[in-house]
Image (cartoon, grey):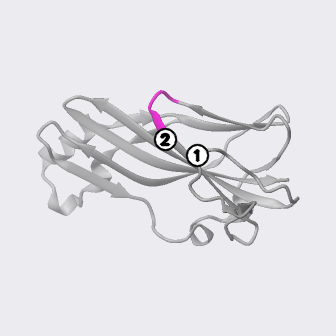
Amino acid sequence: MKYIIMFILAISLSACSNQDIDTAQDYSYEVGSVTIISGGIEHNPHVRFAHSGTRTPDGETMTASGPFGSLYVLVDIDELPVVRYSDGFQIIVDGEDARRITYTVYNDNFELASVNGKILIGIEDLLFPDESGMYILVISVYWSYQAPPASAYAVFDYIIRVVR
């Protein structure tokens, strides 16, 4: 699934001019996608917009943020796709503009999970606890696009339940 980021969301419509709107639309871009493969089956995670920003050629900066609050409040766990963890478990990030990928793992009580005392928040190498159970995996992807003299970035969270 592809998403078009329109950085116009960063500006209060009552406070911006038509030129601001046109400028923001000129510097939108398409981010890639994330797919989870387990047991030979492809799964599409729930996608949540976290944050974005752009710098226009004239140096103006615009930013936008998604809804604030804990994951527990923002996501209905019962509506998240469920994947059974298997030896062939893969996360495929498709898109040339993916700059940074981090993983956070929660248990089914929305408590941060840990492995050997290491809390699994914002880690760059995916780890899962060995204990069986239901986990919530958040894959945060920082997408960045450079087209001098403008640049833009967006952060999306891709969320799925994993049964171990």
Q: At which x and y percent is residue 102?
A: 56, 48
Looking at the image, residue 87 lies above or below residue 121? above
- The span from disc 1 to disc 2 (Cα, nearest Å) is 8 Å
Relative side of 36 to 39, left or right: left
Kind of residue sitting beneath label 1: Glu
Q: Nearer the viewer, residue 8 or 127?
A: 127
Kind of residue sitting beneath label 2: Arg
Q: At which x and y percent is residue 132?
A: 88, 59
Instruction: Specify the farthest residue to the right.
Output: 132
Residue that carries the numbered disc 1 in the rendered image: 124
How crowded pointer 1 is (Cα within 10 Å; few <14, some 14-19, many 20+) is rated as some
The quadrant where residue 54 appears: top left
Residue at image position (47%, 27%) is 96
Badge 2 marks a residue whose secondary structure is: strand
The dot on residue 100 is: 2
Q: Which residues are magenta?
A: 95-100
The dot on residue 106 is: none
